Image: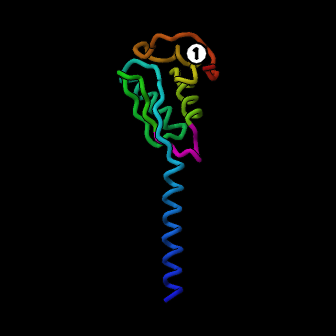
Amino acid sequence: MKSLILSLTLLLGSIITTFVTAQSVLKNETVKVWGNCETCKKHIEKAAKSAGASTASWNEESKELQLSYNSLKTSSQKIQQSIANAGYDTRDFKGKKSAYNKLDKCCRYDRKGAETPEKIKL
């Protein structure tokens, strides 16, 4: 009987530890990403997911990208870099001019400067 109680206690402890660990690696974040239209939405979300986001939903009005990702596999910086590589400026990265110029004409939003995918100094 004691061994059964001990086994159940260890099993319950393991389940709780796994649940807490899983919750701490899942990150939800909102990132500003500039774009204009439904085509931008598709490109931005695809770039985010290709960099490891499990979910990505960009809002055309607010210019905000809602992200969920496993922080053991990727990071906000990697996701934003992927979006910048697709030609869209984020709060921390600006895409190269060459990537921006490849965007559909409807997707060419007003840019405010940098032409390299460097981290913006805040």
Q: Residues within 10 Å of mark 1 (few under 14, many from 20)?
A: few
Q: Is residue 7 magenta?
A: no
Q: Position of residue 106 (x, y in %)?
A: 40, 14
* Corner quadrant of residue 94: top right
Which one is nearer the viewer's eye here, 91 or 82? 91
Point 48% across, 29% down: residue: 31
Up/down of 118 relative to 14, above or below: above
What residue is drawn where x is 49% and y is 89%?
1
Relative depth, front residue between 4 and 52? 4
Residue drawn where x is 52% and y is 23% of the image: 90
Magenta span: 68-75
Q: Can you say whether 50 is above or below 112 in the image? A: below
Residue 97 x %, y %? 58, 14
**Relative image position of residue 15 (x, y in whole percent):** 49, 66
Type of the residue with mark 1: Ser
Q: Residue furthest bottom?
A: 1
Across and down, in percent, residue 21 comes to 54, 55
The residue closer to the viewer here, 33 or 84, is 33
Say which residue appears at 53% left-offset and 67% top-offset: 14
* Vertical arrangement, residue 25 with respect to residue 94, above or below: below
Which residue is label 1 attached to? 98
